[in-house]
Amino acid sequence: LAKTTQPISMDSYEGQEVNITCSHNNIATNDYITWYQQFPSQGPRFIIQGYKTKVTNEVASLFIPADRKSSTLSLPRVSLSDTAVYYCLVGGGPSTGFQKLVFGTGTRLLVSP
Amino acid sequence: NAGVTQTPKFRVLKTGQSMTLLCAQDMNHEYMYWYRQDPGMGLRLIHYSVGEGTTAKGEVPDGYNVSRLKKQNFLLGLESAAPSQTSVYFCASRDNEKLFFGSGTQLSVL
């Protein structure tokens, strides 16, 4: 299983761009990289998913270098409501049987006024 | 669509008691998962299922059993609850891209 490493916590201010990097040195060829957001007392919620290069949706961008050993979640112009824990999840390919999805420890983002 | 529904939302058990947590999904997903989350910690995979009638162990399966008799339901059982099983339990189902989580069950074992 591709183990992930993320910073434990990050601080930011409203309106700033936040970049959270996840390391996954032993990612398998068919593994995808997925990011989730979790608010207190709620289940995680899907943010974005990618395989390589760059993916962008209405809430975030995901940057994946050519070697795929890391990925960076970019949140543009954060607001107070972006305060949450962010998880990087690697898997979903045949190396993990397509099914076994293991979360890392996550990054606790605190956005201040 | 309700998505993923977990029952009960809260439960208090005494050590040694048994109980079953129910997860139901209405999205016709094949894959379903049970995670536990201790205070201030990340999610740990207990068991998962790749389809009706199948189950498999995750990272922390000891002390838990599961069953997937129907595609839409995934049950998590504690045969003899221990204080170390005090946690929030999340169920999830998955389509081809992402996981969909329930709202969780807060379980306290005294």
Image (spheres, coloured by chain):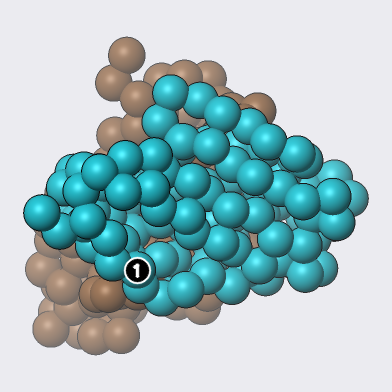
Chain colours: A cyan, B brown
Q: What residue appears at the point 40 percent right and 53 percent down from the top-left corner?
A: A18
Regarding residue B73, the answer to whether it shows in the image is: no
In the image, residue B88 above or below residue B16: above
Question: How busy is the neighbourhood of tag 1: few (under 14 within 10 Å), some, or many (20 plus)?
Answer: some
Can you identify the residue that label 1 sits on?
A10
**x then y, percent, for residue A51:** 75, 40
Which three-letter amino acid code belongs to the residue tagged 1?
Met
Q: Secondary structure at mark 1?
A: strand
Q: Residue furthest top?
A: B1
Q: Is residue A54 left or right of residue B42?
A: right
Rendered location of residue A102, percent (x, y): 59, 61
Q: Position of residue B99 (x, y in %)?
A: 50, 38
The chain to which mark 1 is attached is A
Q: Nearer the viewer, residue A99 or A31?
A: A31
Q: Nearer the viewer, residue B10 or A107?
A: A107
**Residue located at (11% from left, 68% from top):** B12
Q: Is residue A94 above or below residue A60?
A: below
- Of all residues shown, which one is farthest toward the right? A29
Q: Position of residue B54 (x, y in %)?
A: 66, 45
Rendered residue at 15%/58% (across/down): A112
Looking at the rendered image, the quarter that the N terminus of chain B falls into is top left
Front-lying residue, A43 or A78: A78
